[in-house]
Image (cartoon, rainbow, N blue to C red):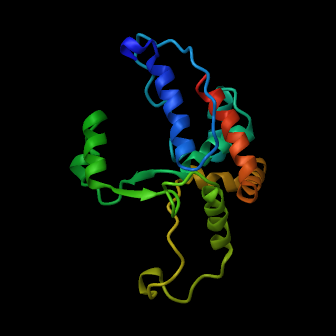
Amino acid sequence: VGKCQVSWADAIAVSGAAVVEALGGPKIDVPTGRKDVTMEDAENRLPDGSLTSGAIRDYFRQLGFSDEELVALLGAHTIGRWTSLLGVQPACMAEEGLKFWICSREQGRRLPFTSRPTLFNNDYFKDVLEFERRQKMPRPAKRYKDRADGGLPALYLLPSDIGLLYDAALHRQVEKFALDQAAFFAAFSTAYLKLVS
């Protein structure tokens, strides 16, 4: 970057790995030597949060990722938050581009993927399986809004997260990573290096 002879691409890739490690995740040794591009990257490069399991697989297969790698990359949802559009005003919803991005973040609710969004661990996979468990529970006698506080903690998952449950191969990876954090860390490290190469 600038006079350091480090490209922006390297700075972003190395910084991402450093954040994962700083939040308790694996140490990922990212090789350097990437060249910066001179034109803008294509828009919509990140997969949409509403994709089905089949669409998620198609998206990641186009990029050369296996089922294990794509589930491991989705495991990055163990950190951070996403913006719910509930409560966003209609005028904001009519905006496009940067204006929509700004107003939706000002008006929307920032929801954590897990209960510990500043730790890189396998909580995300445990929460995905917890969602499945709750779906199989008997329906409560009282409507949600009529229940007393002190119930189950909220789960804030995207439709694409839940979609992992409806594909047998992806479901097996979720179960594997929920039970074995070391396996998740190893798969994530490999997939991250592939992603930034």
Picture quadrant of residue 126: bottom right
Residue at the spot 54% in from the left edge and 77% down from the top edge: 152
Picture layout, residue 43 above or below residue 35:
below
Q: Is residue 47 visible?
A: no
Residue at the spot 51% in from the left edge and 51% down from the top edge: 79
Q: Position of residue 136 (x, y in %)?
A: 68, 73
Q: Is residue 85 left or right of residue 31?
A: left
Residue farthest left in this picture: 91
Q: Is residue 82 left or right of residue 71?
A: left
Q: Position of residue 124 (x, y in %)?
A: 60, 56
Of residues 66 and 165, the one drawn nearer to the viewer in this rendering:
66
Picture quadrant of residue 37: top left
Picture quadrant of residue 179: bottom right
| Number of marks | 0
Q: Quadrant of the C terminus?
A: top right
Q: Position of residue 133 (x, y in %)?
A: 67, 70
Q: Is residue 91 visible?
A: yes
Q: Quadrant of the N terminus?
A: top left
Q: Position of residue 71 (x, y in %)?
A: 67, 44
Residue at the spot 42% in from the left edge and 87% down from the top edge: 146
Q: Is residue 49 left or right of residue 126?
A: left
Picture layout, residue 57 above or below residue 24:
above
Q: Is residue 55 left or right of residue 19?
A: right
